[in-house]
Image: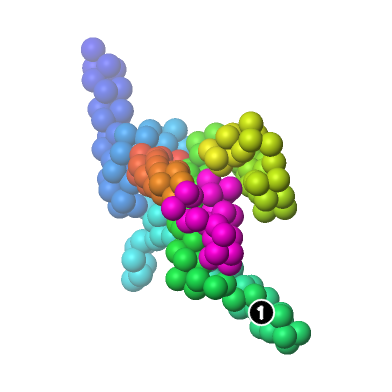
């Protein structure tokens, strides 16, 4: 009986130490406590708290999104500058519509990026390979190389469910007056990007312990 009491007390002390460690790192979920126990981090002394705020996985993901967005803006600016040297006009006829399409592309990219990061943490690097292959496939059938009006109608029906196709057509509508932006399914882009972002944020909250372990 005494041995059972000692065992239960030992387990209670470990659980309490793991809970305290989870609170210190801001990962207040069951998965975080379990990860600390599995990795025996509760037995190790807690690192000395620095005088700087604790960086959470969400901060790293957001910073990567900002970095990638700034990188794309710089590349686009350099490309436009290089093209302007040859007196080639690449500015759209409807600048506002082009800006909306680019902003929607950034939103979609951030949403899919969040979802990809948390799924890689959950499944592993195999999901990253799968995600890259899927994105390559969606890009190849997005209509960037071959306009949808040159593709048979039966295939165009399937292309309409590709958010990248909608983005390409949206940006084309800013260059060519013959394109009707009202016919573009903008809601598909918003829904795919929004749902991916929501799933990424929710999963990050519940899988924070796996990120930190």
Instruction: State the residue lying farthest toward the top.
Output: 1
Tally of marks: 1
Q: Nearer the viewer, residue 96 or 102?
A: 96
Instruction: State the residue lying farthest toward the right.
Output: 86
Q: Position of residue 185 (x, y in %)?
A: 46, 46
Q: Nearer the viewer, residue 142 or 30?
A: 142
Q: Is residue 190 magenta?
A: no
Q: Residue at x 49, y 73 (%)?
A: 95
Where is 85 relative to 72, above or below? below
- Specify start and end residues of the magenta stretch as a single range: 163-184
Residue 38 seen: yes
In the displayed structure image, the side of residue 60 where residue 19 appears, left or right: left
Q: Is residue 164 magenta?
A: yes
Where is 41 relative to 91, above or below? above
Q: Which residue is under mark 1?
A: 89
Q: Residue at x 50, y 56 (%)?
A: 180
The overriding secondary structure of the stretch rendered in magenta is helix
Rendered image coloring scheme: rainbow
Q: Secondary structure at mark 1?
A: loop
Where is 5 relative to 206, above or below? above
């Amino acid at each position: 009986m005494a041995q059972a009491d000692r065992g239960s007390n030992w387990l209670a002390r470990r659980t309490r130490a793991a809970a305290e460690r989870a609170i210190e790192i801001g990962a207040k979920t069951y998965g975080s406590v379990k990860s600390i126990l599995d990795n025996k981090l509760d037995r190790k002394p807690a690192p000395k708290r620095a005088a700087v705020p604790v960086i959470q996985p969400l901060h790293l993901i957001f910073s990567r999104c900002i970095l990638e967005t700034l990188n794309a803006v710089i590349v686009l600016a350099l490309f436009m500058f290089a093209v302007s040297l040859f007196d080639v006009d690449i500015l759209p006829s409807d600048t506002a519509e082009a800006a909306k399409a680019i902003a929607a592309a950034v939103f979609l990219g951030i949403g899919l990026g969040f979802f990809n990061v948390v799924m890689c943490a959950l499944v592993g690097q195999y999901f990253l390979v799968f995600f890259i292959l899927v994105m390559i496939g969606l890009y190849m059938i997005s209509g960037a190389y071959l306009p949808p009006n040159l593709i048979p109608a039966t295939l165009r029906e399937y292309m309409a469910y590709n958010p990248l196709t909608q983005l390409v057509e949206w940006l084309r509508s800013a260059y060519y007056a013959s394109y009707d932006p009202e016919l573009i399914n903008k809601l598909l882009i918003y829904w795919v990007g929004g749902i991916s972002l929501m799933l990424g944020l929710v999963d990050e909250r519940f899988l924070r312990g796996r990120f930190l372990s």
